[in-house]
Image (spheres, rainbow, N blue to C red):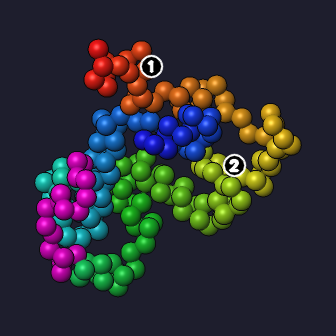
Amino acid sequence: DDYMILQRDLMVDGGLKPVSEEEVLAVRNKAAKALQAVFNKLGLPPITDEEVEAATVANGSKDMPLRDINEDLKAATEMMDRGITSLDVIKALAQSGFDDVAQNILNMLKQRIAGDYLHTSAVLDENFNIDSAVNNPNDYQGPGTGYRLSQQRWDEIKDIPIALKPEDFETKEGGN
């Protein structure tokens, strides 16, 4: 939250976007279900529905149900012995209906092979295209030059859901 305020106050793009709690919970739940599906497809110790629900709302590992650590460690060793790779994980995700997650992981693997993300100041966009100092050189030549926030991005940055409006400050902070 503090960094989002700094982005707004300094009018810089630090890459953070405000999201709602509902959005976060939906992403966490999908991730837990995807992992549950991968474990199932690869024959690893099952992830229970209780664990999926706990992972969706957990603040840390203490909020998770206990797992059989010995079985998980044996499964990790077995994965290495079986030669399971990230391509096997991608296949398991796709076969389980998580095509978008599988595609994103495949795209990240492609980036690891190409190595373009290692360029100076490299950033991946939503289509996994690289924007870096190599293909988009910095043209900064003093104030008023170089990277500038688009109006759309500036509107995103300054729309912080937790920020108090000046007119609401007294009532929300215990004033009149």
- Residue 70 falls in image quadrant: bottom left
The x and y percentages for residue 151 are: 64, 25
- Residue 12 falls in image quadrant: top right
Q: Which residue is mark 1?
A: 166
- Residue 162 falls in image quadrant: top left
Q: Residue at point 42% right, 60% down? A: 90
Q: Which residue is mark 2?
A: 131
Is residue 50 toward the left or the right of residue 81 in the image? left
Q: What span is colored magenta in the figure? A: 56-72
The kind of secondary structure element at disc 2 is: strand
Image height check: is 13 above or below 64?
A: above
The x and y percentages for residue 50 are: 13, 54
The x and y percentages for residue 98 are: 36, 49
Precedes in sequence: disc 2 or disc 1: 2
The kind of secondary structure element at disc 1 is: helix
> Is residue 146 magenta-colored?
no
From mark 2 to mark 1, how far is it between C-alphas?
Answer: 37 Å
Q: Quadrant of the N terminus?
A: top left
Is residue 121 toward the left or the right of residue 94 in the image? right
